[in-house]
Amino acid sequence: MDHPKPQHDDAPTPETVLRRAFDPELFRTLGHRLIDQLASHLDCALHDSRMPVLPWVDPEVMANTWPPDFPERGNENLNALLGRVLDAANHLHHPAYMGHQVPGPLPAAALCDLVASFLNNSTTVYEMGASGAGMERSVVRWMAATLGFGPQAGGVLTSGGSVGNLTGLLAARELHAAKCRRKPPALLVSDQAHYSILRAVRVMGWGAAGVETVPSDPRYRLPAEALEEHQHRAEARGRTIIGVVASACSTATGAYDPLPAIADFCEAKGLWLHVDAAHGGAASLSDKYRHLIDGIQRADSVVWDAHKMLLMPALVSGVIYKRGQDAYRAFEDEASYLYERTPEEEWYNYGHRTIECTKPMNCIKAYAMLHCYGTRLFGDYVTATYDLARRFAAMLREAPGFHSATAPESNIVCFRYIPDGAGDLDLLQAAIRRRLLADGNHYIVQTHLPAGLHLRTTLINPFTRENHLAALIGAVREAGDAIQRQG
Amino acid sequence: MDHPKPQHDDAPTPETVLRRAFDPELFRTLGHRLIDQLASHLDCALHDSRMPVLPWVDPEVMANTWPPDFPERGNENLNALLGRVLDAANHLHHPAYMGHQVPGPLPAAALCDLVASFLNNSTTVYEMGASGAGMERSVVRWMAATLGFGPQAGGVLTSGGSVGNLTGLLAARELHAAKCRRKPPALLVSDQAHYSILRAVRVMGWGAAGVETVPSDPRYRLPAEALEEHQHRAEARGRTIIGVVASACSTATGAYDPLPAIADFCEAKGLWLHVDAAHGGAASLSDKYRHLIDGIQRADSVVWDAHKMLLMPALVSGVIYKRGQDAYRAFEDEASYLYERTPEEEWYNYGHRTIECTKPMNCIKAYAMLHCYGTRLFGDYVTATYDLARRFAAMLREAPGFHSATAPESNIVCFRYIPDGAGDLDLLQAAIRRRLLADGNHYIVQTHLPAGLHLRTTLINPFTRENHLAALIGAVREAGDAIQRQG
């Protein structure tokens, strides 16, 4: 590449191709075009009522539109390609997006991710992302203080809640290593816990028997009074309980487990308390709703996803430990080419606290958004969406044939439509949802509850209003009635 | 938020604050400004010889420049904040960046990450990122075919090589589950394997004894002929070997393990072969160097990071399985609110193959860069950097007092400076590196090898040339001699 050979065809030299790919002026042109594409897209998603939330395309058809036929020499129309990605997306910024717990993010936060990707610095090793070490520490401290933890708390930002839950549980296992050697361990887990808990338990090698499932109460909460009995059951089948996993809130229905009573139990029994607050940790920012997480500051570890109710793009999850040094327990193995000193001496090398080796600077968006918009925006947003869920539940009570699974505690609402003479209710809900998907005017999801399959909404878009919810109720009824008529 | 109360102070209503944060025109302004900031930054990093690679700041000082003092109401100067992040970065685009195996990425790939973050779609569930399912399938197929796998191969993109190695090893454990129940399992692993292998083994609950360490040969490669003896050793201490981990190439010195001989052993013994090709899988794109990974298509699982030698921003790692259905083995637990059918029927729901639940669309950058720039750019780049490492080794042979650890096989070169009368060689190398860090004109790292601490370079920047390497040799000598003089 240093000494390019004379070229006998018109093909550019490798040097020319590389220089072009890294040319600052070409980047500037592509970048400005993309910003305009995104601004227009955002405007449409927020304001153009004719735009579908999700332009449904069958998976096999979609696969064929993105074939693996990469050319030897490129076809540089990046903006056209990205335009196709924009058009095909699930438009989370659309106010009729009410599906999974992922927001249409603050657009400025996406700009922060552009910086993170462009620099490609990381917070594993201080030298590779020095400002990130400072920002990450501050975001973690702010999260810990907001949840009510004291100054000994600490932790790490990681790539997602599933890896976050695994990270917290690895610390639990490490603390109880002696116990685990005597008898295979298990955790007390509600039947409403997120599937990443069971997945983490399996990853750790405990098998499905590593979870002692506690049936939830009629409001889908973990009944603290049942914990002791289930601890005995686990012991009886040869497992030693080392901790309890609580949800704040649960994924399916958004129910908050009773943290003070669960914390009492854990303290009395010497068990680790891990709280999966991936979604609901943000209640800590709302004067009106922070009571829902009372007691969370007694947990040993907490996971809180900023890419849910803090309106960030995925992924950026906080793993917060009541005792900050617990963050290091599971990762004391050596990597001589990375570190020079002991983990505790090196708070600024975040690789000592996480499964990840190259750990991207997802702290930039969290730090910058809190700094640039302030904390109140997030608290007001939480309050507004939680309020709206309560109004939606009231609307469902008024709507003939509609039945909520439970009174909402967060901004998640599950319901069913049961018209007169309906047959298999689960099949009907699933068919209704498929119709809505094909129409594209609303995006909602579904979940299996003990009482059957329910339609499920998360009111996570800050611009969803009662008129959108009224339209959803109308669309569900229309779809359900049409399905009924067709038999 | 729907019906804002009259405000008696000048504070904006929550509605106004949110509308402003999501305003497409304000986003457009911030975005265009940022593109200009990045273009200027790139121009300086590539071309301004006065710019340091890494402007060193002490961690405690850095922490104080990013305090956790988030205001209640924001201070919206995002561009100024991001400018500070740009200034403080380790400038990977600088041709004197020769440190860890992370590139200054293709700037257009960072724009793809902007789109991924902005849309916040994911490829866990098809509905949440439909085009991503198509792109991810194609990128995985292309990676598999490029490595030499047949049409049965498949896999997944995941957030990093460490999680990728864990993912591949979980499949190995699942396949050998019966064996693992009879006796605790272990893997045969070179002493030069990446630390994420040991970490994955510990995460899986096998303890440090889950690794049977095989000492590397004088060229830092896993000696295939030693595998059988170490299998017996593991059996003798009560462990059953279920697989072998090979490196292609290793992290510290960039050595390629002899894959054909290792594959022969694994086939003869019925063991899983996992190849960590996070860095060196890209040799498959170089006509000149692809022989280094001959035999990789006989592996059961391979990890290949696109955020290393494919010039992408972190994270985007391929986990490729010889038998595509192996990808599903470890993740068959249920998540009823996500999936409707069995994993194999749902190739388009990538959550069935990964630890992640929300899995970002890191496929966009991989697909778009291969499409827009073509495959030859990457092959030429690999050839050029591997060539350059050989020239650097020749320069080191000519330079008095310099000693390479080994003849480079990839673009990683480790060496020491040993001036006449040097005392503790390890202390000297470490002191040299600290001086270089403080100067900021070169960024290199260090690694412990059996022969002692070595300075370590990865020639990963496509614009690093012999003059930069000559300057590095001069700077190392100058630093070393100065340290010697000071005693």
Image (tube, coloured by chain):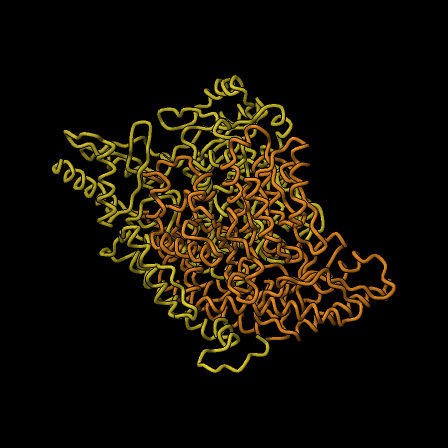
Chain colours: A yellow, B orange
* Position in image of residue A74 (x %, y %): 42, 70
Numbered disc total: 0
* Position in image of residue A434 (x %, y %): 24, 43
- Pick out the residue farthest to the left: A485
Q: Quadrant of the N terminus of chain A?
A: bottom right
What residue sits 52% from the left and 61% below the top? B284
Q: Could you say which quadrant of the image residue A444 lies in?
A: top left
Q: Could you say which quadrant of the image residue B430 lies in?
A: bottom right
Does A119 sit above or below residue A449? below
* Position in image of residue A85 (x %, y %): 35, 59
In the foreground, B144 or B449: B144
Kindly tell me whether residue A151 is visible in this rendering: no
Q: Quadrant of the C terminus of chain A?
A: top left
Does A400 sit above or below residue A348? above
Question: Relative to B461, is B486 on the left or the right?
Answer: right
What residue sits 43% from the left and 36% below the top? A195
What residue sits 44% from the left and 35% below the top? A248
What residue sits 43% from the left and 61% below the top? B112
Does B478 sit above or below residue B299? below
In the foreground, B172 or A65: B172
In the foreground, A206 or B450: B450
Kindly tell me whether residue A319 is visible in this rendering: yes
Question: Relative to A65, is A232 on the left or the right?
Answer: right
* Position in image of residue A362 (x %, y %): 51, 53
